[in-house]
Image (tube, helix red, strand yellow):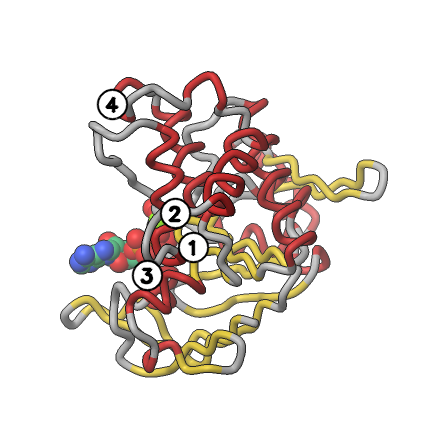
């Protein structure tokens, strides 16, 4: 569904991505993990063609994205940006309806309204639907932006830290909604996310990005204490809870103590 073939990108002379290559199949949610500045947002913007990669190509359902017109790209790819301000004088309902724009020819149809109503309901935005965007909290606005991308009904969804402003309940609700959209509609989703445990709970696949190159990519087996330490420079314990893996970051002092013990053991 989404195929990224050796993307390299530099801001002026500063190289940020180097030969990034991976696939995300339909029905798969892939999380990009990596420290601040690793190149996650840049990678999403290159896929979206907001930025032009120096090398490499992006295929959507086998077709080269660089040959697609803006409207066609918008029909096929939904994007939730890391920083979103939103048009202040738009109501929540109208903002979500904007997601239908790539599909609308002459006017808003019953199908468009039906899709918007469904998404508004799924994300529990009904009570906010007539409020203006500048009257929303940061988390409420983030949910509206995610709703707009879902209303677009794209084949590929790119999400840049979609849960960063959300409280615990809304983090779960948004992740459940995205995961449901991915599995039920066969969407290929690529999500930059900092919460490794949230990623472990909802993703099918993980890409660890370090310094603009893929350090590891695969299923939950790539989330090991060694890999996490390499990518984030933090010692963690990896535990299994039922069928699910979780990571427990060790506090700095604990991490130092473990290191000291390891040194003694040598
Ligand atoms: N417009 C820009 N011009 C120049 N350098 C930039 C620009 N945007 C980002 N960078 C640099 O490119 C590198 C990658 O940035 P990017 O935003 O892709 O990181 P990220 O992995 O998304 O980080 P974060 O987790 O903080 O969101 C960083 O070193 C950043 O300073
Ligand atoms: Mg980013």
Tags 4 and 2 touching, CB below 8 Å: no
Residue 159 disc label: none
Q: Which mark is residue 45?
A: 3
Cα–Cα gap, marks 4 and 1: 22 Å
| 16 vs 153, nearest the viewer | 153
Specify the quadrant that holds the N terminus: bottom right
Q: Are marks 4 and 1 in contact (CB under 8 Å)?
A: no
Q: Are marks 3 and 1 in contact (CB under 8 Å)?
A: no
Mark sitting earlier along the chain (1/2)? 1
**Of the residues under marks 4 and 2, which one precedes in the sequence?**
2
Horizontal and vertical percent for residue 91?
31, 27
Mark whose residue sits in front, 2 or 3: 2
Question: Which residue occupies the extreme right position in the image?
Answer: 242
Circle 3 packing at 10 Å, graded few (<14), some (14-19), many (20+), is some
Tag in front: 4 or 2: 2
2 and 3 marks in contact (CB < 8 Å): no
Pointer 1 residue: 78
What is the spatial separation of the Cα atoms under label 3 and label 1, in whole angstroms? 12 Å
> What is the distance, in whole Å, between disc 2 and disc 3 at their CAs?
18 Å
Label 3 C-beta lies within 8 Å of the nearest ligand 1 atom: yes
User: Which x, y percent locates residue 210?
Assistant: 44, 61
User: Residue 2: image x %, image y %?
Assistant: 52, 71
Question: The residue tagged with tag 1: helix, strand or loop?
Answer: strand
- Identify the residue position indicated by label 2 in the image: 99
Real-space Cα separation, disc 3 to disc 4, in angstroms: 26 Å
Mark positioned earlier in the residue sequence (4 or 1): 1
Disc 4 designates what residue?
134
Q: Residues within 10 Å of mark 2 (few under 14, many from 20)?
A: many
Residue 259 percent across, percent down from the top left: 59, 43
């Amino acid at each position: 569904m989404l195929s990224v073939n050796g993307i390299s990108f530099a801001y002026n002379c500063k190289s940020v991505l180097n030969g990034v290559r991976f696939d995300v199949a339909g029905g798969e949610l892939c999380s990009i993990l990596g420290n601040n500045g690793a190149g996650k947002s840049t990678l999403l913007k290159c896929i979206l063609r907001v930025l032009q990669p120096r090398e490499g190509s992006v295929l959507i359902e086998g077709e080269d994205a660089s040959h697609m017109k803006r409207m066609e790209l918008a029909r096929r790819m939904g994007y939730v940006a890391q920083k979103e301000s939103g048009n202040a004088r738009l109501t929540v309902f109208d903002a979500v309806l904007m997601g239908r724009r790539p599909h609308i020819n002459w006017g808003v149809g019953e199908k468009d309204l039906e899709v918007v109503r469904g998404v508004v309901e799924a994300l529990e935005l009904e009570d906010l639907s007539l409020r203006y965007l500048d009257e929303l909290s940061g988390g409420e606005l983030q949910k509206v932006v995610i709703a707009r991308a879902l209303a677009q009904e794209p084949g590929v969804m790119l999400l840049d830290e979609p849960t960063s402003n959300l409280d615990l309940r809304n983090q779960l609700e948004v992740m459940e909604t995205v995961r449901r959209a991915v599995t039920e509609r066969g969407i290929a989703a690529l999500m930059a996310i900092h919460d490794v445990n949230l990623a472990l709970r909802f993703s099918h696949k993980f890409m660890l990005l370090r310094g603009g190159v893929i350090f590891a990519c695969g299923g939950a087996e790539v989330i090991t204490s060694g890999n996490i330490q390499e990518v984030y420079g933090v010692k963690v314990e990896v535990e299994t809870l039922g069928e699910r893996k979780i990571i427990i970051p060790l506090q700095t002092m604990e991490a130092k103590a473990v290191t000291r013990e390891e040194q003694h053991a040598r």
